[in-house]
């Protein structure tokens, strides 16, 4: 198994796509911390207008720990889900197109083994990309906090103390929020056998799901309850649990800042998302095991 | 229909299909195929386009599921022991099957990690053997079609399988490459590896295969040793000749007993006679023409070959001709 995962990593690390996607993630982290956080704070810090100065505490949350961490993870989960989806779609569909999927199976690898190794290899590589972007974001936070003269601490005045364990949980919650979208991209691509279908499918899903949830929320009543079954609504619950306090957060995710009072309990959300993951895996493995991998058809 | 077919000795069968059938919707791609490939032989799998060759290979490799029947590889039923059976097999498949962004050596390293129990030394050996040593570090996307075919063969043989399945392996190879490839196949067979090769290039198959099976419209028409099948052809043999006076020669030859037909072809006269009379006809023709003061400048018996046999039993010509041209 170790050798097979190493083979998957070897295939991924020599492609150019992950590095382009990493650049996008780093750019996103930079925009979140430097542009939305530090630069806006810096431009208003000496502002005489009290109305504008009232925004400063909110802006500080964009780059100063511990608030900036959930904000960055919120943005990372939103954009990261789509970026991971694109990478997974490409990783799977290209193996169909190159004929290497059927070559692997013709060499005695079982279909379940092939799918599992692809999934684990791609997941590991995606985790590395996301953690690299997170590390860049955290380093940026430390730097901007230092430039702004703020204390670098996980125990800020007016907010609950955070331990390193809390930080790990915060990161895991956001990471888990990426998983259902990654598995959805995986399912769409395995079934559709196309990078374009997998990539556009996951991006459209995120956009349409978010739009529908906003509409259902506005309609209220039973309509609003439908959101309970959506991935986004439950991911929002996990991200809301990450928040350090109830103040406004600046995030480059195209959705409202999640507020715990409007969302399901994080544990309920966790199990709903687990159900989504299991369902997507079952469908993917079932279809792939029953499918003919015909020669000479680009499969 | 079965012409001159003999069943291979079943003592050491490495690939057997039993009533193998595949249906795509209403189209029957393969209809109850029963073939046996014996150890150490080079087995040619012939048939016109769409006859079911690639479907058979895909079924044997577990890429598609049979509608009925099953495949046994190395004595193992692939319905229950697919992975175990396929570890003893190397295969090149129709179309591409490589990682274009990796070098030739890294492609083989990936396959080594995925399933083949292969050392770096063995990877170097197979790269050398298929003639890619000087390009081993180059990205495969920059390779010619022929080089990609060589890489596919390297991947197929790197784990020293008991049987190699090759689907149209010489597509894209130049004449020198085809010759080298033929030698490689003979070397593999000499080393005890069974080779199953699907091709539509009949002259190539005739030169490198011990046994052949011929498919048409998803059905096995015949299988057996090449020599036996070709020898059993009902087609008349021919004598090719050039003379100093073709017009007079035609009159003389048409009057001879045992001559089936005389025609002009590529500046020569072609005299057709029943196969068993070919040698006798050559001597008689020589004598009869000399008596009429018509002198021979060339006299050559033309033997039956696999292409003739194939065309005779399948009624196909285009594929065979194309194959012969490609190999010329």
Image: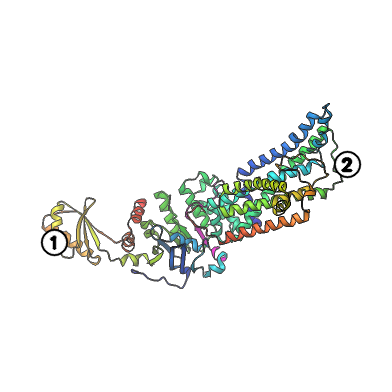
Say which element carries label 1.
loop
Residue nearest the observer in this picture, A40 or B274: A40
Tell me, yes or no, whether the highlighted magenta stretch contains residue B95: yes
- Quarter of the N terminus of chain B within the rendering: bottom left
Decide if residue A61 is in sight here: yes
Q: Quadrant of residue A29?
A: top right
Q: Are marks 1 and 2 in contact (CB under 8 Å)?
A: no
Q: Residue at x 43, y 59 (%)?
A: B198
Name the residue that disc number 2 marks.
A158
Q: Residue at x 36, y 52 (%)?
A: B327
B15 left or right, relative to A26 = left
Does mark 2 fall on the same chain as mark 1? Answer: no
Tag shown at residue B255:
1
How far, Cα to Cα, is label 1 from label 2?
A: 119 Å
Q: Residue at x 81, y 32 (%)?
A: A147
Return the residue found at the far right: A157
Magenta stretch: helix, strand or loop mostly? loop
Say which element carries label 2.
loop
In the image, the segment drawn in magenta is B84-101
């Amino acid at each position: 198994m170790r050798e097979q995962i190493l083979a998957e990593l070897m295939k991924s690390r020599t492609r150019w796509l992950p590095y382009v996607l990493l650049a996008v993630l780093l750019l996103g982290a930079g925009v979140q911390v430097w542009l939305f956080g530090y630069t806006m704070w810096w431009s208003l810090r000496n502002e005489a207008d009290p109305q504008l100065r009232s925004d400063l505490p909110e802006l500080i949350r964009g780059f100063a720990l511990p608030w900036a961490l959930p904000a960055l993870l919120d943005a990372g989960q939103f954009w990261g889900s789509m970026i991971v989806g694109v990478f997974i779609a490409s990783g799977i569909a290209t193996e169909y197109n190159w004929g290497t999927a059927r070559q692997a199976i013709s060499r005695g690898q079982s279909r379940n083994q092939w799918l599992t190794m692809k999934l684990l290899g791609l997941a590991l590589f995606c985790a590395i990309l996301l953690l690299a972007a997170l590390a860049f974001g955290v380093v940026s936070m430390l730097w901007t906090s230092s430039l702004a003269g703020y204390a670098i601490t996980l125990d800020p005045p007016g907010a609950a103390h955070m331990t390193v364990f809390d930080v790990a949980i915060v990161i895991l919650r956001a990471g888990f929020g990426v998983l259902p979208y990654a598995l959805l991209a995986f399912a769409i691509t395995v079934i559709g056998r196309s990078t374009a279908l997998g990539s556009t499918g996951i991006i459209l899903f995120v956009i349409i799901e978010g739009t529908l949830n906003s509409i259902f929320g506005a309609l209220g009543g039973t309509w609003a309850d439908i959101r309970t079954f959506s991935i986004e609504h439950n991911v929002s619950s996990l991200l809301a649990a990450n928040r350090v306090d109830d103040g406004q957060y600046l995030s480059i995710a195209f959705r409202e800042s999640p507020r715990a009072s409007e969302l399901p309990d994080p544990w309920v959300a966790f199990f709903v998302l687990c159900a989504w993951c299991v369902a997507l895996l079952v469908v993917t493995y079932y279809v792939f095991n029953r499918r003919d991998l015909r020669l000479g058809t680009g499969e | 229909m079965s012409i001159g077919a003999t069943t291979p000795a079943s003592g050491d069968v490495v690939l057997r299909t039993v009533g193998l059938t595949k249906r795509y919707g209403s189209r029957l791609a393969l209809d109850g195929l029963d073939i046996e490939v014996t150890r150490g032989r080079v087995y040619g799998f012939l048939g016109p386009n769409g006859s079911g060759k690639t479907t058979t290979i895909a079924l044997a490799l577990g890429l598609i599921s049979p509608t009925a029947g099953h495949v046994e590889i190395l004595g193992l039923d692939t319905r229950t022991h697919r992975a175990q059976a396929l570890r003893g097999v190397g295969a090149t498949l129709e179309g591409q099957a490589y990682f274009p962004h990796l070098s030739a050596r890294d492609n083989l390293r990936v396959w080594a990690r995925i399933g083949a129990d292969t050392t770096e030394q063995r990877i170097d050996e197979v790269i050398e053997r298929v003639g890619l040593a000087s390009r081993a570090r180059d990205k495969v996307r920059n390779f010619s079609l022929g080089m990609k075919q060589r890489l596919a063969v390297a991947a197929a043989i790197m784990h020293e399988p008991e049987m190699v399945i090759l689907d149209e392996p010489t597509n894209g190879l130049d004449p020198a490459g085809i010759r080298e490839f033929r030698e490689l196949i003979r070397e593999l067979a000499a080393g005890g590896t069974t080779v199953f090769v699907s091709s539509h290039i009949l002259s190539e198959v005739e030169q490198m295969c011990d046994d052949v099976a011929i498919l048409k419209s998803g059905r096995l028409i015949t299988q057996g040793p090449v020599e036996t099948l070709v020898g059993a052809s009902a087609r008349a043999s021919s004598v090719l000749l050039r003379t100093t006076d073709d017009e007079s020669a035609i009159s003389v030859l048409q009057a001879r007993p045992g001559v089936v037909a005389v025609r002009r072809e590529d500046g020569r006269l072609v005299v057709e006679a029943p196969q068993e009379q070919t040698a006798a006809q050559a001597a008689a023709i020589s004598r009869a023409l000399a008596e009429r003061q018509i002198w021979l400048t060339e006299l050559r018996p033309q033997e039956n070959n696999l292409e003739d046999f194939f065309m005779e039993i399948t009624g196909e010509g285009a594929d065979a001709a194309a194959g012969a041209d490609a190999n010329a």
